C-alpha cells in the first residue's frame, strides 16, 4: 500500500492517515514447511483537501500500485485488498 499512497499523492490527493489490519494465513508447503500463503489487507484511508478520489480513482490507483509494488512482485503469497474505507 506504500506504492498506492505514493501514487495518490502524485495525483494530487492529500492522504492524512492510513491504517490497516492485515491478516496473514500460514499453511504448509509441499515439504511441510510453514509459509505465509496469503495476506488480506483492510485499509482505512483518510483524505483531506479539495481533491478527493472517486471510487473509480481508488480502483485505478489500486491497480497501478499493485503492478508497481515491490512486495507484490517479489513474493509468492496471494495478496488481497478488501473493503477500502475512505473518509
Image (cartoon, grey):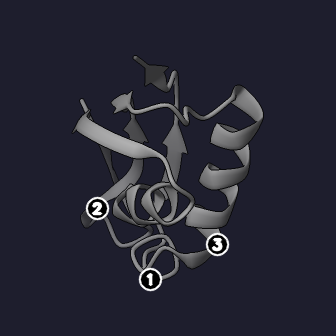
- Give the image location of residue 8, x and y in percent: 49, 55
Q: Name the residue under label 2.
A: 35
Task: Work out whether residue 26 or residue 2 is closer to the camera in this orientation and state it.
Answer: 2
Mark 2 neighbour density, 10 Å: few (under 14) some (14–19) many (20 or more): some
- The answer to whether 60 appears left or right of 73 in the picture is right
Disc 2 on helix, strand or loop?
strand
Classify residue 81 as left or right of residue 53. left
Task: State the quadrant of the N terminus.
Answer: bottom left
Residue beneath the point at 44% across and 82% down: 74
Residue 87 versus residue 33: which sits nearer the camera?
A: 87
Sequence-first tag of 3 and 2? 2
* Residue bearing the label numbered 3: 67
**Is 40 on the left-hand or right-hand side of 81?**
left
- Mark 3 falls on what kind of element? helix
**Quadrant in the rendering for residue 3:** bottom left
**Where is residue 13 shown, x and y percent of the image?**
48, 46
The correct choice, above or below, for 18 with respect to 30 in the image is above
| Left or right: where 76 falls relative to 57 | left
Amino acid at each position: 500500500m506504500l506504492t498506492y499512497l505514493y501514487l495518490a499523492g502524485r495525483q494530487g490527493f492529500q492522504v492524512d492517515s492510513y491504517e490497516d489490519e492485515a491478516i496473514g494465513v500460514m499453511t504448509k508447503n509441499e515439504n511441510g514447511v510453514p509459509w505465509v500463503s496469503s495476506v488480506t489487507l483492510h485499509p482505512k484511508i483518510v483524505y483531506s483537501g479539495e481533491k478527493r478520489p472517486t471510487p473509480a480513482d481508488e480502483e485505478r490507483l489500486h491497480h497501478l500500485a499493485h503492478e508497481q509494488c515491490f512486495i507484490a512482485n517479489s513474493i509468492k503469497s496471494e495478496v488481497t485488498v478488501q473493503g477500502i474505507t475512505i473518509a
